[in-house]
Amino acid sequence: MREGRSLVERPCAPDPGVTEVARRHAPDGRRTPAEILDRAAEEFPHLQEYIDAQCV
């Protein structure tokens, strides 16, 4: 997902090492969980339906 986007535009996992690298390279990129979920819902509006369909 998100091919063609820079690394600072991609989310990182909650791994302390990865988080530290992200802080150094995108210090203004920190968001609250609510902001992350809102943006994810905007970018992937049918994600929940896709996930539900995989569970059938």
Image (cartoon, rainbow, N blue to C red):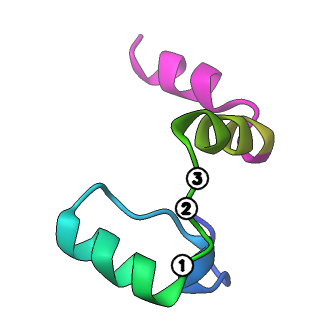
Q: Is residue 6 left or right of residue 14?
A: right
Q: Are marks 2 and 1 in contact (CB under 8 Å)?
A: yes
Magenta stretch in the rendered image: 43-56
**Is 6 located above or below residue 53 in the figure?**
below
Which numbered marker is on residue 31? 3
Q: Are marks 3 and 1 in contact (CB under 8 Å)?
A: no
Q: Any magenta on residue 18?
A: no
Looking at the rendered structure, the number of numbered marks drawn on it comes to: 3
Check disc 3 and report its element: helix, strand or loop: loop
Q: Quadrant of the N terminus?
A: bottom right
| Dominant secondary-structure state across the stretch colored magenta | helix
Distance between the Cα atoms at labels 2 and 1? 7 Å
**Is 7 located above or below residue 45 in the figure?**
below
- Of 47 and 37, which appears nearest the observer? 37
What residue is pinned by disc 2? Answer: 30
Q: Any magenta on residue 53?
A: yes
Whole-percent x and y of residue 44? 71, 42
Identity, as a three-letter code, of the amino acid under mark 1 = Pro
Q: Are marks 2 and 3 in contact (CB under 8 Å)?
A: yes
Identity, as a three-letter code, of the amino acid under mark 2 = Arg
Callout 2: 10 Å neighbours few (<14), some, many (20+)?
few
Distance between the Cα atoms at labels 2 and 3? 4 Å
Identity, as a three-letter code, of the amino acid under mark 3 = Arg
